[in-house]
Amino acid sequence: MATDQKAAKLIDGKKIAQEIRTEVKAQVEEWVKQGHRNPCLIAILVGEDPASEKYVANKMIAAKEVGINSQTIRLPNTTTESEVIDKIHKLNHDSSVDGILVQLPVPAHICERNVCNAVDPLKDVDGFHTTNIGRLTLNTDTFVPATALAVYELIKRYKIDTFGKNVVVCGRSKNVGLPIAILLHSDANNELPGCEATVTICHRHTPPEELAFFAKRADIIISATGVVNLIKPEMVKPGACIIDVGITRITTENGKTKLVGDVDFEGVSKIAGYITPVPGGVGPMTVAMLMFNTYKAAKHTIHSICSE
Amino acid sequence: MATDQKAAKLIDGKKIAQEIRTEVKAQVEEWVKQGHRNPCLIAILVGEDPASEKYVANKMIAAKEVGINSQTIRLPNTTTESEVIDKIHKLNHDSSVDGILVQLPVPAHICERNVCNAVDPLKDVDGFHTTNIGRLTLNTDTFVPATALAVYELIKRYKIDTFGKNVVVCGRSKNVGLPIAILLHSDANNELPGCEATVTICHRHTPPEELAFFAKRADIIISATGVVNLIKPEMVKPGACIIDVGITRITTENGKTKLVGDVDFEGVSKIAGYITPVPGGVGPMTVAMLMFNTYKAAKHTIHSICSE
């Protein structure tokens, strides 16, 4: 192994997120100048989860910054599924609303899938509707879930080559790992951007020695598991690009808490060529990509989301 | 490498297909005995492609054998897209029809995606509708495309262990390679059967030495590319299971033609533990799985395929 301990280049998600917000802001201004109303994003928040409160608040701040009108509809924890769905249907039919998102998780008595599928696919800026997941899988233009789009944009803007490269995706969640794997393995000639990489999808039942085997061969490792220290320096090929989607709050020796990702940042950054920090990597990007998706919804450029 | 040249066990697709047809036939008989009408499958064939003619004819024979009423609607090559779609809509609203398939490919002036999306998702026995692809990706109960289901059934019925095993899928087509990769990597606890394997998706831009690297580590290789002799003996781990979905007609030295798969069968069968022949492997299984899907459509067990 190379002993050249040059530190990896930091992938600055905060900076790129700000770039994207600035771009969206300029596009929204131009759009409004052309005579359109400002895009409008509605978030539905059911219950009082403090983390969800904070996520939604961040989205509202970002929306305001880029010129997207936004509003949070707060529903009590006792709201029934059909009440939530009724509210969504009203917003679907409200032509002044472009994007609708339901902040997840919803309380246990509400079926997350039913709620996601209640949103009009053309207003589904989270990209969680079954039809939009199908469009993603088929590489038809759609709203790509924000985290997957965030990973794609970071790779693209840092000019990391993906064509014919080996990618390991750790985690197969429907909202994060799997959409990332789909974007990264797919054909660049389709409606959605494809990255033409050879992708290995690892998950909780991948034996550690097999994960290490695949990771060591990978040009890019994307980890989205919430398992602290899953990716260790000895698993990484010198010069590889490491994208850390994990975010876990841990208690340090002095009793304070801090946020960490899936990657042993200190060790891996001595081996890798590129690495995202946590926080400040993928995290800030997801809100920026949500703004991108909301402006896209306002433009109505996605054609024929049909289901029958 | 082991030099023990014990031949691989042959995975007999013809025999398993016959087993499945016998099972479906018994279930249809029981269904009819309960007072239901026989299931009904309609195939739409646009144009006069001889291969398509033959595929459809095989489906009709299989349907008859298992007690599924069937009919082929032949439309001339000059039929417009909207005429095909009108025909599909009529069948969608015909309560005597359970399953509808449009034999692919359709003539170039017709958009395949529009035609696939015209079929009611609940009658879409090919599983090609965007909503059904989304359901597959989300591991929600759906019509799994027949070839992917065929591969799954062969693996299951030969008791090939997939849990935490390494699988290489060669080919990322939306109808074959990708659905196979989705089934094989996914969680066994979902509505659809998942196989819990670690899956690497290889394709035309995977460099040959990387394909060899991943293949050599694989417990199961599934090849669906149409590239003759893609999988060579030196790429295969002793004892691995090889599923060959490729089917290509080649001309042999004596000027005759024969069907071959993606795998160097003679060489690989000396190394592998299990191998499918071509023909007689995956091929006969796909028609059987279509019958399985048609009976499933007749039973209406798939709940709430909703799109908004």
Image (cartoon, coloured by chain):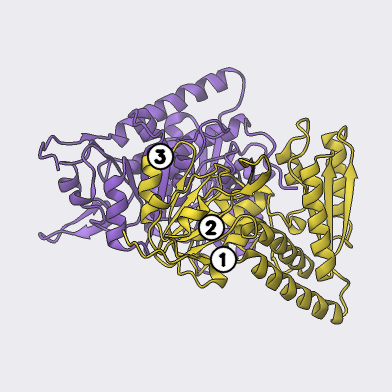
Chain colours: A yellow, B purple
Q: Which mark is residue A243?
A: 2
The x, y position of residue A284, in whole percent, is 69, 60
Q: Residue at x 44, y 49 (%)?
A: A232
Q: Residue furthest front?
A: A254
Above or below, A84 relative to A148: above
Q: Which residue is mark 3?
A: A208
Above or below, B284 relative to B88: above
Quadrant housing residue B83: bottom right
Name the amino acid, label 3. Pro
Work out whether disc 2 and disc 1 sit on a shared chain: yes
Q: Is residue B107 left or right of residue A252?
A: left
Of pointers 3 and 1, the one earlier in the residue sequence: 1
Q: Which mark is residue A124?
A: none
Work out whether disc 3 and disc 1 sit on a shared chain: yes
**Cα–Cα span, label 3 and label 1:** 27 Å
Q: Residue at x 73, y 54 (%)?
A: A121
Whether residues under marks 2 and 1 lie with C-beta atoms below 8 angstroms apart, the answer is yes
Name the amino acid, label 1. Ile
**Cα–Cα span, label 3 and label 2:** 19 Å
Q: Quadrant of the N terminus of chain B?
A: top left
Above or below, A2 relative to A108: below
Of pointers 3 and 2, the one earlier in the residue sequence: 3
The x, y position of residue B18, in whole percent, is 35, 30
The x, y position of residue B167, in whole percent, is 37, 44
The x, y position of residue B8, in whole percent, is 19, 36
Q: Which residue is mark 1?
A: A11
Whether residues under marks 3 and 1 lie with C-beta atoms below 8 angstroms apart, the answer is no
Above or below, A94 relative to B149: below
Of pointers 2 and 1, the one earlier in the residue sequence: 1
Q: Residue at x 41, y 41 (%)?
A: B286
